[in-house]
Amino acid sequence: MTDSAPPFRLERLDHLLLLVDGLAAAERFYCGVIGCAVKARLPQFAMAELSAGASAVDLVDISVDEGAWARPVRERGRNIDHFCLATGPWDEQAMRDHLARHDVEIVEERREAEGLSFYVRDPSGNVVELRRPAA
């Protein structure tokens, strides 16, 4: 390992590709609950590309043949532990009510200097952190 900086500047997370079991349920969660929007559908790859603010979340349905290309080898382990979506300010009770209306359980909460985070699971079990900025 060297002490030199890389020859580029990191700018942002461009996209995250998630493996899901059922594209329709995943789209309902990410669009209906989280507020993403479908940018493109690639049925030949069992894939949907969603906008998530300035970033993107790509979904691949590994439960169908077209998504077989993305199925993990058992030794590779799971998708990821979680990913975090930074949000604008929100009222805590309004957010709790919104998630409850969609039958989305808050599996963990954190209050830190960076703000308040609610951790929820998508229909495939992936953990999504929704982080509100500090007041």
Image: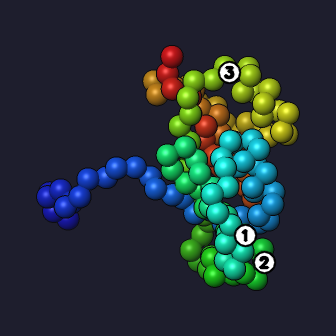
Residue placed most toward the observer, 3 or 99: 99
Question: Gap in Å between the C-alphas at discs 1 and 2?
Answer: 6 Å
35 on left or right of 22: left
**Which residue type carries mark 3?**
Glu
Residue at image point 51% right, 58% down: 15
The residue under the point 64% across, 63% down is 40
Quadrant where the N terminus is found in the figure: bottom left
**Does 109 appear above or below 48?**
above
Task: Indicate which disc residue 61 carries.
Answer: 1
Q: Are marks 1 and 2 in contact (CB under 8 Å)?
A: yes
Instruction: Tell me the residue that label 2 is attached to.
Output: 64
Residue situated in front as seen by the camera: 66 or 132: 66
Q: CA distance from mark 3 to mark 2?
A: 38 Å
Outermost top residue: 135
Tell me the amino acid under the disc marked 2.
Val
**Disc 3 to disc 1, C-alpha distance:** 32 Å
**Drawn side of residue 27 relative to residue 133, left or right:** right
**Sequence-wise first label, 3 or 1:** 1
The quadrant where residue 39 appears: bottom right
- Please tell me whether residue 18 is drawn above or below residue 68 in the rendered image: above
Above-or-below relation of 64 to 24: below
Measured as percent of width and height from the top left, residue 108 is found at 67, 36
Q: Is residue 48 above or below residue 37?
A: below
> Which residue was labeled with disc 3?
92
Report x, y in % for residue 22.
79, 65
